Amino acid sequence: MIRTQRATFVSSPYRREQHAALAGQVLAVSSPQGRLDVGPYDGRLLRAVEAYGKHLLYHVDDAPTLHVHLGMRGLFLRYDDPAVPPRAGVRLRLAGAGAAYDLIAPLRCAPLTGDGERALRSSLGPDPLRVDADGDEAVRRLGAARGAVGAALLDQAVWAGLGNAWRAELLFLAGLDPDARAVGPATARRLWELAVRHLSLGRDAGQVVSDPAAPDERWVYKRSTCRRCGAGVRAWRLGGRTAYACPVDQPAA
């Protein structure tokens, strides 16, 4: 059986599955594409798979941490039979006793030295899906961000892991215009709590979930009309991506 894993929103669902399938095993690691030196990883024990925002970190015994970022095009193919040969274009294959994962077209797949891993972690804001996330720091960072709140939510140095769909839906749930500025502590706290709750639902469902009663529906993201009130959804460029908002439920300040 072959199953595709795409970068739908954050890396936590991939971490959970791959950690369960591969951690604690000595892996066969290869790079059919030839763009990664697998010498430090092949035949070594995978201790853990970690997710931080949109990043996956593979911790292997006596080897540098392996860093994967799927980006917009990257995906994993899972094979329940690890003996199935990989395709020629596969950047990385991780094969255990009962499954193999083939990585295709990632934004990044490279070892991280100790300094590189520290630099990556320090560049990221709190991740709503991590149990060690500091909510007070998340509130502080969002409150200190300059410019529009909709741009700040896509800045991984403010909060790690949010993408465009989550931005649109969380701001709708908070009743906040993406162009709003000078977000106060109470509003930042509400947004953070919404992110923690709904990203957890999305992680478990494998998709963006902004309405648990209708998990396949969106309020404003890529919609022409608001699902709540029927008003025409505004769409414009903000922070390099298309922003969506309901003029009724998210009134401009």
Image (cartoon, rainbow, N blue to C red):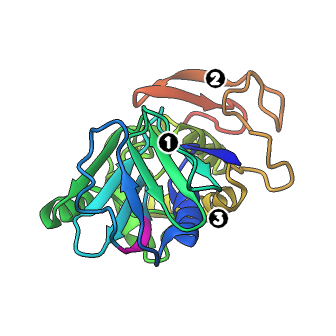
Name the residue located 36 percent from the left edge and 38 percent from the top edge: 107
Tag 2 or tag 3, which sits nearer the N-term?
3
Secondary element at tag 1: loop
Would you name the residue on which mark 1 appears? 86
Discs 1, 2 touching: Cβ within 8 Å: no
Q: x%, y% of residue 244?
A: 61, 30
Tag 1 or tag 3, which sits nearer the N-term?
1
Q: Is residue 62 above or below residue 138?
A: below
Residue 163 as seen in the image, left or right of residue 211 = left
| Viewport quadrant of the C terminus | top right
Q: x%, y% of residue 170?
A: 61, 48
Q: Identity of the amino acid at label 1? A: Pro
Would you name the residue on which mark 2 appears? 234
Residue 197 — which label?
Answer: 3
Residue 167 as seen in the image, left or right of residue 149 = right
The CA span between labels 3 and 2 is: 26 Å
Secondary element at tag 2: strand
Residue 83 as seen in the image, left or right of residue 206 = left
> Residue 121: in sight, yes or no?
no
User: Mark 1 against mark 2, which lies toward the viewer?
Assistant: 1
Name the residue located 40 percent from the left edge and 64 percent from the top edge: 126
Q: x%, y% of residue 55?
A: 39, 54
The CA span between labels 1 and 2 is: 44 Å
Q: Which residues are magenta?
A: 45-50
Q: Identity of the amino acid at label 3? A: Arg
